[in-house]
Image (cartoon, grey):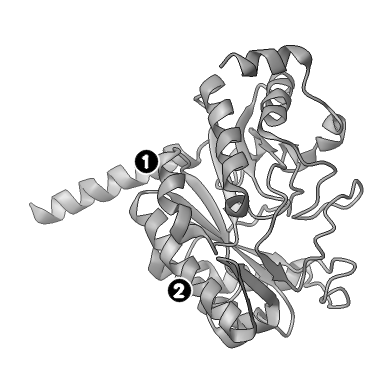
Amino acid sequence: MEQEFQIIQRTAVSQTVAEMTAKHPCYSFDAHHKYARMHLPVAPICNISCNYCNRKYDCVNESRPGVTSEVLNPEQCLAKFRQVKQDFPDLSVVGIAGPGDALANWQPVKKSIELIQAESPETIFCLSTNGLLLPCYGQAIIDLGVKHVTVTVNAVDSAVGAKIYHHVLFRGKFYTGEKAASLLYANQLEGIKILVEQGVLVKINIVMAAGINDWHIPAVVKKMKELGVFMTNIMPLIPAPGSVFQDFPQANRIEVDAMRDLCQGDIRQMRHCRQCRADAIGLLQDDQSHRYRGVVITEMDSKEIACR
């Protein structure tokens, strides 16, 4: 009887996961051919400094995480969502992935989601974070109804992390070196546990930097498996001009796929990531964000929002 109950329980969980991923293009390979997503660039502030990032996010021509051509306020996010939804009936996901950290900008992030939720409750919401503030906002994320969260975890060893992160700003204090990496990792662990225990599907992004953490990635994946995350997304380092790692080599597709293959036995791997901009719009393989740059909130939208 107990064995039958466990089988039923596992089946129910599988069905729930299938429903949660069916229309999310990042969480489902099949979905990324069918459903569009929209990133809201409403989070400009960041609380850590990564050696692969230069924080110069205002770029029209670059296509990488953390880049956007504009930063919006919540009301502008709603106005832009309305227009994009009209143009993309298959828009299923609204995500917040920068250009800074979603949780370091919690109030505008929260308000943006609430405004769109009120108008489009069927929309799936997700956000990306470095995880530093997850222990502080984990429950708030859950209460907001966000079921998909991506956390970037590049190391589970402070010595490795110290080579990736220049500094961390937490509760008004700067941390550097291994202290910074250790604090970040501890908060990531605590926050991920909070989310997973409440049924949030957590995806882990891992930036693969040759000679820095590439050899360490299997250990990261194994630890994330222990925590019960849904999947990991191993991505090649993009050497951003002006960053500490600007002259580092970028892992090629063969090297990245080999690492994914190595880690596949531990946890499912995302293999269709496009390392999107913070203002990406459309299908993963067909970003249309350039069509919507400079779109401003209309007077009618302003009046509607003021009456809410």
> Which residue lies most toward the front here?
172
Q: Is residue 119 left or right of residue 67?
A: left
Which quadrant of the structure image shows residue 93?
top right
Query: Which label belongs to residue 84?
Result: none
Q: Which residue is mark 2?
A: 223
Residues at marks 2 and 1 touching, judged by CB atoms closer than 8 Å: no
> Which residue lies most toward the bottom here?
159
Query: Which label belongs to residue 16?
Result: 1
Q: Is residue 247 left or right of residue 116?
A: right
Q: Residue at x 51, y 37 (%)?
A: 22
Q: Is residue 75 left or right of residue 155?
A: right
Residue 55 can be seen, yes or no: yes
Packing grade of label 2 (10 A; few <14, some 14-19, many >=20) is: some
Residue 177, how many percent across, how many down?
64, 84
Residue 208, how many percent across, how many down?
69, 72
Which residue type carries mark 2?
Lys
Foreground pick, 142 / 10: 142
Asked if 272 appears above or below 88 in the picture, the reply is: below
Q: Residue at x 77, y 48 (%)?
A: 277
Q: Is residue 70 left or right of residue 127?
A: right
Q: Residue at x 84, y 71 (%)?
A: 243
In the rendered view of the protein, which quadrant contains the C terminus? top right
Name the N-terminal-most of marks 2 and 1: 1
Asked if 182 appears above or below 125 in the picture, the reply is: below
